[in-house]
């Protein structure tokens, strides 16, 4: 049914590459040119994050991948979430996770955008891995402050106060969880949310994101 729907939808709203905007076939998720320019993380997942047993990311947050994330955040890049989830599934299959959740988005932003990009990515990934999801474990408090306006150190402190457990959440004691986000920049968000899940009883938390900012020695850190 999904492919039939995509084919019919393409007649009225032609499919576009989420990274460059070019028209692509109805059953494609990204154009060949952009796909060839995507750069794998290569080792960035080895950088440890507090509270996460591992952090798995697919692409460096630059070039077409960065544009794909921007498109996703603008509410019109679902193709990139599906594409990224498929690539993440290749890396996470067999990881032993029992349940999947995601970094929660502010309610106001979700209402404006029409979806939560981390949740959307998690849903596509869950389909690939055959895992159940629970997006009612964590909550994000309302604030007008944007993380991209903060330094790495400020992000870490801010994230610690931003996320918390949802009251009367399901029992996750002793379970191994996958925690999904769209981008891992400084790692503050994944670390904070993973810490909450561990405090809620999770035995282990694996962080995962489509993209990760990879810092080059001597280069000024980029904030996103």
Image (spheres, rainbow, N blue to C red):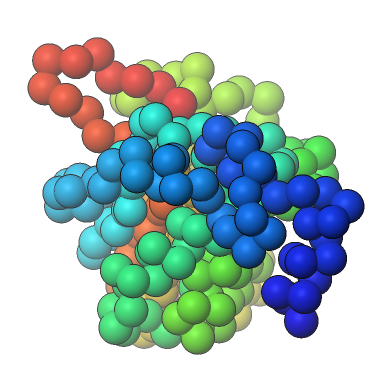
Residue 157 percent location from the top left of the image: 39, 32
The residue lying toward the viewer, choosing from 133 and 151, is: 133
The residue lying toward the viewer, choosing from 34 and 110, is: 34
Name the residue rendered at 44%, 19% in the picture. 150
Residue 160 in which image quadrant: top left
Residue 4 as seen in the image, left or right of residue 26: right
- Tell me: residue 158, above or below residue 111: above
Name the outermost residue toward the right: 12
Residue 69 as seen in the image, left or right of residue 4: left
Residue 106 in which image quadrant: top right
Residue 31 as seen in the image, left or right of residue 143: left
- Tell me: residue 30, above or below residue 91: above
Residue 156 as seen in the image, left or right of residue 134: left
Residue 211 percent location from the top left of the image: 38, 45
Count the numbered circles shown.
0
Name the residue rendered at 50%, 17% in the picture. 149
- Tell me: residue 125, above or below residue 216: below
Residue 126 percent location from the top left of the image: 52, 76
Residue 220 percent location from the top left of the image: 24, 13
Residue 187 in which image quadrant: top left
Name the outermost residue toward the left: 217
Q: Is residue 50 visible?
A: no
**If the image is split into quadrants, where does the C terminus sit?**
top left
Name the residue rendered at 33%, 79% in the picture. 93
Q: Is residue 66 visible?
A: yes
Name the residue rendered at 80%, 71% in the picture. 5
**If the image is split into quadrants, where does the N terminus sit?**
bottom right
- Tell me: residue 140, above or below residue 10: above
């Amino acid at each position: 049914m999904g492919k039939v729907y995509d084919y019919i939808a393409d007649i009225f709203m032609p499919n576009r590459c989420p990274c460059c905007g070019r028209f692509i076939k109805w059953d494609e998720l990204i154009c060949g040119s952009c796909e060839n320019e995507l750069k794998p993380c290569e080792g960035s997942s080895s950088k440890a994050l507090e509270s996460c047993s591992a952090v798995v990311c697919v692409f460096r947050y630059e070039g077409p991948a960065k544009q794909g994330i921007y498109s996703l955040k603008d509410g019109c890049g679902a193709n990139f979430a599906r594409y990224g989830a498929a690539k993440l599934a290749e890396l996470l299959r067999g990881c032993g996770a029992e349940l999947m959740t995601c970094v929660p988005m502010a309610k106001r932003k979700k209402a404006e955008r029409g979806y939560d990009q981390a949740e959307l990515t998690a849903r596509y990934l869950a389909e690939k891995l055959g895992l159940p999801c629970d997006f009612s474990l964590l909550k994000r408090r309302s604030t007008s402050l944007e993380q991209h306006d903060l330094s790495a150190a400020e992000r870490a402190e801010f994230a610690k106060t931003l996320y918390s457990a949802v009251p009367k959440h399901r029992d996750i004691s002793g379970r191994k969880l996958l925690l999904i986000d769209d981008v891992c920049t400084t790692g503050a968000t994944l670390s904070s949310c993973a810490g909450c899940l561990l405090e809620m009883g999770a035995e282990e938390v694996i962080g995962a994101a489509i993209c990760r900012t990879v810092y080059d020695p001597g280069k000024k850190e980029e904030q996103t």
